Image (cartoon, rainbow, N blue to C red):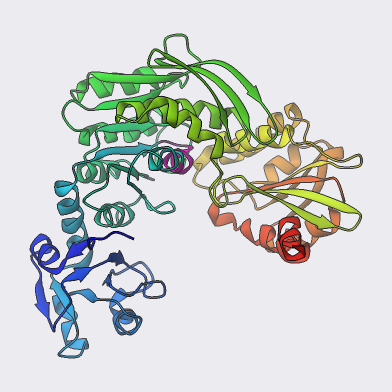
Amino acid sequence: MNALPLWTLDAMQAAMRAEANGAPPQAITGISIDSRTVAPGEAYFAIKGAVHDGHDFVDAALKAGAALAVVEKAQVGKFAADAPLLVVDEVLAGLVDLARASRARLEGQVIAVTGSVGKTSTKEALLHVLSAQGQTHASAASFNNHWGVPLSLARCPAAARYAVFEIGMNHAGEISPLVKMVRPHVAIITTVEPVHLEFFTGIEAIADAKAEIFEGVEPGGAVVLNRDNAQFTRLSRRARECGISRIVSFGANERAEARLLDLSLHATCSAVHADILGHEVTYKLGMPGRHMAMNSLGVLAASSLAGADLALASLSLSQLVPAAGRGVRQTLLVPGGEIILIDESYNANPASMAAALSVLGRMPVGAQGRRIAVLGDMLELGPTGAKLHAGLNEAIKAEHVDLVYCCGPLMRNLWDALSTGKRGGYADNAANLEAQVLAALRAGDAVMIKGSFGSKMKTIVSALEKRFPGKAALDEAAV
């Protein structure tokens, strides 16, 4: 816990040009937008969402111990005359003002991460690596949108040595205002892939939208780009147009400054030999998959550019673990033995599906075990959706996946493309597929579950966890 408060009342009031009501305390320990999880001493921001208005939960937040609530002037009459409030014209705008004040006081190195695939895992890897070398702050979960970025920035301690922010988008024009708020010293684009095609004319338009991240890079700053990606030339040209001269590339390409020299892939980890900005390093990466290994090159390049020690950073990568819903694996006990469950349920697109199927293809299975993929719809692909879903069959064949369960109208296209022997089952949604998957599993299987967040594949993960006990939990209980 920090010795100093995150914010003083005076600093918050000045940043947001807010009027104080009641008698809020001077020390504010954190920022929250959720009355259910607000901690004592935090400031609760009553943001209006698509479904709920945060003003309806101000009393609950204060009762839970919030130091104060930030509310809009038009709704002050709802609350007790002595309620501890900071009153602003509009709450989200007030949070943005506080975020800008947070960035203005921050003296540490700031890194911003975007990309079609791998944003969150790259952000988490940077957090892991840099935390070993100094106080590091990073976006929680996938807080990468119009409220998540200012919330993450407002939560940044003034004394942070490093700060890492994830920036996402579904439409053109969304990254620009967010990166101008973050003002990174280093910006990373992990890759550009056919994601959110429903809202773009093509892959080049997606690249241009990702390139908006260059607009906020601090003078003298750097960008880190994937040289193996087909959009590298377009992105690097745009970076130069934005006045950025330090362009560092990563990949297997022989011209990459963070270059893969050798890679040994294993079921649960990888061994990487690379040249990072002229320094050869060999390291173990605690997560499997070629895609993770490639992104680790960008992580080490960005860390070095931010002033971190390269040797310590590469050593830290051995302890890296996946974030929830992004490749977390566990052993579950079933009649007659065990199965391996790989939870990839948080999100999906064609590139991440191919990567996850590649990891599944390397998973060891028992004598009678099978490699089973349980796949839900990949959303926001527009008119190309049917073709991209059917196209997953090539990766399924290449990675020797034994059995496939599909759910959702888009995944029907893959189901129709599968050979009869690989068809496990189909349903129109995850809830209806659940029973088929539960009934099919047997000792020795490795099962990977993946789909876009909206396809609700987490329900099948939860059903497996509920039906079959986890080996780790049982081992711990036996101690």
Pinpoint residue 385: horizontal percent, then vertical percent: 56, 40
Pinpoint residue 25: horizontal percent, then vertical percent: 18, 76
Residue 123 located within the stretch drawn in magenta: yes
Residue 429 visible in the displayed image: no
| Quarter of the view holding residue 215 | top left
Q: Which residue is drawn at 56% across and 44% down?
A: 322
Which residue is nearer to you in this view: 265 or 374? 265
Pinpoint residue 295: horizontal percent, then vertical percent: 48, 30
Q: In this view, does 3 lie above or below 312?
A: below
Pinpoint residue 92: horizontal percent, then vertical percent: 23, 63
| Quarter of the view holding residue 148 | bottom left
How many marks overall? Answer: 0
Q: Residue at x 79, y 36 (%)?
A: 364
| Quarter of the view holding residue 312 | top left
Q: In this view, does 245 lie above or below 439?
A: above
Q: Is residue 135 above or below residue 94?
A: above
407 to the left or right of 201? right
361 to the left or right of 338? left
In the picture, which quadrant includes the N terminus? bottom left
Which residue is nearer to you in this view: 175 or 331? 331
> Which stretch appears magenta?
115-124
58 to the left or right of 131? left
Residue 376 located within the stretch drawn in magenta: no
The secondary structure that most of the magenta stretch takes on is helix
Residue found at the very far top of the displayed protein: 254
336 to the left or right of 344? right
Residue 238 visible in the displayed image: yes
